Image (tube, rainbow, N blue to C red):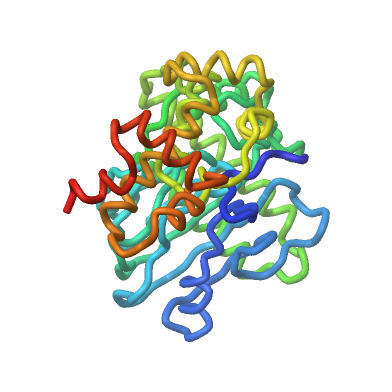
Amino acid sequence: MNLPPIYRAQGQKLLADTCEPLRAAAQSRRVSLAALVRGHYPGRKLPLNALPGLQSVGYWDARSAQDWGLAWHRNEGIELTFLERGKLEFAIEGHSQLLRADDLTVTRPWQSHCVGAPNVDAGRLHWLILDVGVRRPHQAWRWPAWLVMTKRDRMELTKILRHNERPVWRANPEIRDCFRRIAAAVERDRKGGQVSLLAALINELLVALLAMLRHQQPKLDDSLASTQRTVDLFWSDLHQNIEHAAEAWTVSDLARQCGLGVTQFIHLTKRHANATPMQELNRCRLEAAAQLLKSEPRRSVTDIALSCGFASSQYFATLFRRQFGCTPREFRERRR
C-alpha cells in the first residue's frame, strides 16, 4: 500500500523510529535483544512473504540502568508493548507515566511517544508493531489476512482501539503468557522456522487483548476517528515542527498528506483555524520566525525568513507586519 508517510522533514520521508540507541546497546551487549523485523528496526529479518504487516516483534532485557533511551518517535502501525519486569518511563503526546511490571501500552501511528526519561531503566520489555494500513485517525483499518479473528471480533477490537486512546493498561495473566511465548518463539526462529507458531500466538494475543478491553469497558469517543481530528493533528504537527512547515507545500500537497481531497481539506482547515490552508501555513511559519527572532538575535532576518519557508525577505516582512503590527527588525528590538 502506498500510504502517506507519518511526517516529512527536509525532503525526507520519515516513517518511524530507527531504534539506533537500542541497536548500539545490543551490539555492545549492554542489553539482550531478540527481534524479528522488517525495514530499519534492529533484529533478524523476517522472510519476505512471511506475516505481511508484521513490522517488528521481540523484546529487550536490560539487566542494569542504561545510558540511552528512545527519543520522541512514531511507528508505522499499532504498537503494543508489555513490561514484564522492572520499571520504565514512558511518555506519549507530552504526558509521562512510570511503567511497572505488567503494564501494557498501546500507541497508534499518529501518536508521538518516547521511552526513557531520558534513559531506560533495568527491565524486560516486549513489543509488537503491526501495520494496519493507516497513518491518520480517520483512515479505515485493514488487518493482515493471516489474523483469524471473526469479522465481528475484528470490528469490535478496531472500534475500541480507534475510539479510545488510553495509552497504558494493566495486563492480565493471559496477555503476559502470550508475550512470553512469543518471545520464546522469536528466540528459536531461524529463517522463518517459527512463523506458523508466531502467527498463532499473535492471534491469541489479540483475542486476549479484546477480552481484556471488553472487561475494562472503556469509554468510546467517535470524534477520535474523525476527519476533523486528522486535520487538527496535522496542523498541530506543523506548528511544532518548523522544518516540516518550511517545505514547499501546495494545498494539494497538504490535503494529500492528510489522505483527504482538496475541497474537504479546505473546509476542515477553515473549521480548525478560521483560515484557508495557505493562511494557516503562513501563520505556522510566522510564529516560528518570531521565536527565532527572539532566540537567535545575531541571525539575519533574511536567513530566518528563508529557513521558515518564505521565498523572500520582502514577502516575509509584509506578512510579519500584518500579523504582529511591526517589522521583523522592530519586533526583535522590542524583545531586547
User: Which percent across, then down, holds residue 15?
Assistant: 61, 51
Q: Nearer the viewer, residue 315 or 47?
A: 315
Q: Residue at x 29, y 57 (%)?
A: 89
Q: In the shown orientation, is residue 9 left or right of residue 196?
A: left
Q: Is residue 220 visible?
A: yes
Is 67 above or below relative to 28? above
Is 247 above or below relative to 275? below
Q: Nearer the viewer, residue 168 or 319?
A: 319
Is 147 above or below relative to 21? above
Q: In the shown orientation, is residue 283 left or right of residue 95?
A: right
| Count of marks placed on residues | 0
Q: Residue at x 47, y 68 (%)?
A: 60
User: Which percent across, then down, holds residue 127?
Assistant: 50, 54
Q: In the shown orientation, is residue 38 left or right of residue 100?
A: right
Q: Residue furthest right?
A: 49
User: Which percent across, then down, holds residue 293?
Assistant: 31, 52
Is 170 above or below relative to 223? below
Q: Locate the N terminus by quadrant.
A: top right
Q: Is residue 170 visible?
A: no
Say which quarter of the image contains residue 38.
bottom right
User: Which percent across, then down, holds residue 22?
Assistant: 48, 71
Say which quarter of the image contains residue 5.
top right
Q: In the shown orientation, is residue 316 left or right of residue 54?
A: left
Q: Nearer the viewer, residue 42 or 262?
A: 262
Q: Nearer the viewer, residue 186 or 313?
A: 313
Q: Locate the C terminus by quadrant.
A: bottom left
Q: Residue at x 60, y 23 (%)?
A: 153
